[in-house]
Amino acid sequence: MSSALSLLPLSAIGRMSKVPTLPGLLNEQERFRFTPTREAGLKQMMSFLPRAGRQYANRRNYDFGPEKRNNVSLLSPWIRHRLITEEEIVKTTLSRFSLSTAEKFIQEVFWRSYFKGWLEQHPTVWDTYRTDLQASLNELDGNKDLFSRYEKAVGGYTDLECFNFWVRELAETGYLHNHARMWFASIWIFTLQLPWTLGADFFLRHLLDGDAASNTLGWRWVAGLHTKGKIYLARRDNIRKYTDNRFDPGNLSGQPSPIDEYPPPRYRTIPAPGQIPADAFILLVTDEDCLVSELLPNKPSSTIGFLATEHRSPLHVAEGVKQFARGAIDEALRLVGGKIAGTASSSRGVTKLLFNAAKADNVCHIVMAEPNYGPVKTALAEVENALLQGGLRMHFIRRKYDNLVWSQTDRGFFKLKKKIPELISLL
Ligand SMILES: Cc1cc2nc3c(=O)[nH]c(=O)nc-3n(C[C@H](O)[C@H](O)[C@H](O)COP(=O)(O)OP(=O)(O)OC[C@H]3O[C@@H](n4cnc5c(N)ncnc54)[C@H](O)[C@@H]3O)c2cc1C
């Protein structure tokens, strides 16, 4: 790493962190494509379905490499944008298998819902993550050693072949296997001894399924912050076995001690959701729920898209991530049908579109699927204030599935796991 690099201003780090695509990792045919349409998501779900039972339970932990991903569903980018929903995946799986046969797969889908609910109940975790991330970015600016180690990690130039491979795989495909994410995060924190917030940010900028809850809490879980004092440590034998001997990282050094935090995350009761007004309304669509159309009793007078991907990180967000989210919002607008009044990617832009549409349609209600703690919610805070002052009212609606599942997410996953059969019967 040249010394000139370490003098670059922070704004340049985002550009530098776009990992160059090295030849030879994947060719065109090998690369799985994630297309941001509902049809593509449903097709993937149906093609995976026959393997969602015992086959998934027995083989899901293996990362055979990017060209051999039949043992997992690859559904996360569609679920993340709710082009397909958790509920329909559970129901479709149970139309083919008994709960006991597909238990593992269904539990994994509930892990996603668990993290979402838990973060809604402990929102200070998101705020603290954002503050700590900014502090780590500021430290990068002034700490040459940290900057150089960070640049090596995100450029895929460490001494660990497996880690470098995952960096490139992530940059090229926008996806990593769950086990690789765990090894990656563990190596980042305990071997490379980099701040976990910078690693979580790197994921959020490159994962097509990048999600505030699953990502922040996945990293906190590895770091020993989610389950107090219990860290996830990547081990040589485990990596060898579950990569099918593709990698041998040697002994992973480092001083694995759990990270501490004080004060612990504060709990809050999740407020009741809003209702759809009886009067005419404008629909605001974000990348959080692209199937919001199925929750509406009537068509909106107009629909507006809000693409908030720039708010996922203070640094550069990968083009593929932005494209997938953009495509997902276009699909959502298409599924709603009717009058589309445009898509904006800034708080100011979306505020303007909403005021113009409200005036043109003579309405004062805006309806949207409730944004959860994360980038969209942060970006919307400003919008909401401006709308309120201008006499427009926002109504945040919530899926029955979320309401039900989140009633069980205030503690560890085990509490929710025990309730899965009951929750399924209520759905
Ligand atoms: C450090 C770290 C960061 C992560 N960041 C994200 C993220 O930003 N977005 C994201 O969607 N997932 C994240 N995960 C969870 C998990 O790795 C992915 O959901 C999963 O690998 C997606 O691949 P798949 O659809 O093939 O999963 P499958 O194994 O086929 O699982 C089916 C579905 O279950 C859910 N799921 C599976 N494992 C988990 C898990 N551990 N936590 C939460 N949900 C799960 C996902 O919705 C997934 O699509 C992270 C995990 C770790 C350890």
Image: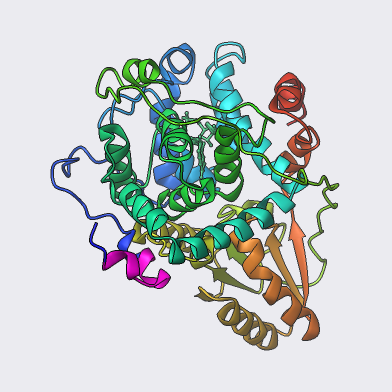
x and y, in percent, of residue 334 in the image: 49, 62
Indicate the position of residue 372 as horizontal and vertical percent values.
67, 54
Q: Nearer the viewer, residue 375 or 264?
A: 264
Look at the magenta stretch and give its main secondary structure: helix
| Residue 85 shows in the view | no
**Across the whole image, how many numbered discs are drawn on residues?**
0
Which residue is drawn at the image coordinates 55% and 19% (left, top)? Answer: 104
Colouring method of the image: rainbow
Residue range in magenta is: 4-14
Q: Quadrant of the N terminus?
A: bottom left
Picture quarter with the C terminus: top right
Along the viewing direction, whichever of 83 and 75 lies nearer the viewer? 75
Q: Residue 286: percent from the left, percent from the top?
A: 58, 62
| Percent coordinates x, y for residue 86 in the rendering | 59, 37
Residue visible at 59% across and 29% down? 90
Seen as rendered, the residue at the extreme left is 24
Residue closest to the eye, 414 or 108: 414
249, above or below 225, in the image: above
- The image shows residue 411, relative to residue 12, as above or below, that is above
Q: Nearer the viewer, residue 30 or 247?
A: 247
Q: In the picture, residue 253 is in which quadrant? A: top left
Say which residue appears at 78% left-offset and 32% top-offset.
408
Horizontal side, residue 102 vs residue 227: left or right: left
User: Residue 144 vs residue 215: left or right?
Assistant: left
Q: Is residue 47 in view from this perspective?
A: yes
- Residue visible at 81% across and 36% down in the picture: 407
Q: Is residue 27 above or below residue 70?
A: below
**Magenta stretch contains residue 192:** no
For residue 231, side relative to residue 266 (left or right): left
